[in-house]
Image: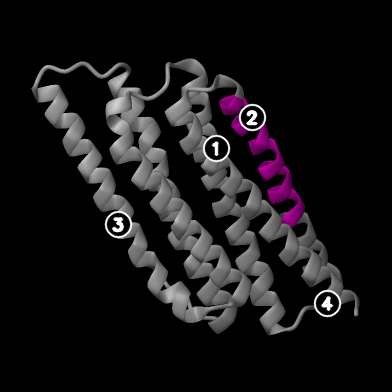
Amino acid sequence: MKLEQEISEYYESILAMSDTVRTMYVMAIEVLNSGSKERALAIVELDEYVNNYNEAINDKAIEILALLAPVASDLRMILAGIKMSTDLERIGDYAKAIGRYVIKNEKMDERLAPYVNPIGNQFIGFFDKAMLAFKEKDIKAALSLPSQDDIIDSEFKKLLHFIETLHNKGEIITHLVPTIGMLRNIERAGDHTKNICEHIIYEVKGQHYDFG
């Protein structure tokens, strides 16, 4: 049927968008450690693909809603997909901001890496599980996964405490304020991944959740 085909293409576009966003974050953690401006520029360029996906998903949603009269379950999937693509677009923006930071500055202070890398890896793991829950329509996972964002927040607080300790000792961290602002992008990406879990629950159950 035409509706099933359109819904399937819509669904696959969301998954393709999420794959691109994930690639951006893997590269973002990499360039923080390597300082590669070439790879950082590639992150910025990938964001254009994410933006294009976002526009295409929204256009497809409008087309399905206007022409194909989807039933309630399909309608929830379409509405959840619109919200999800918006969150994916924001997560991509945060990765782009990290890429721009590396382009403009030296690589991240090596003393921060033992704190930053676990945050990045924790986020990528959280994101992967959230998108798997979307793919499998796994309500149980969508309900439990947002607690992983608390781990990201906790690890970020450890990072801030370490930076504060260095500062109190008179240690110099180059570009301190922009560095903290840039690293906070990983924490913010976790917040938007929680939103994705909310959208999964809405799609499957029609219930609105707010994980805060």
The amino acid beneath tag 4 is: Glu
Q: Is residue 107 left or right of residue 58?
A: left
The amino acid beneath tag 1 is: Met
Disc on the earlier residue, 4 or 2? 4
Crowding near pointer 4: few (<14 within 10 Å), some, many (20+)? few
Residue, disc 4: 4
Residue 68 seen by the camera: no
Q: Residue furthest right?
A: 1
- Do callouts 2 and 1 mark residues in contact (Cβ within 8 Å)? yes
User: Magenta residues, as a range?
Assistant: 39-57
Label 4: which secondary element: helix
What residue do we see at 15% from left, 23% from top?
167
Q: Position of residue 103 (x, y in %)?
A: 52, 19
> What is the quadrant of the C terminus in the image?
bottom left
Crowding near pointer 3: few (<14 within 10 Å), some, many (20+)? some
What residue do we see at 41% from left, 40% from top?
185
Q: Is residue 121 left or right of residue 131?
A: left
The amino acid beneath tag 3 is: Ile
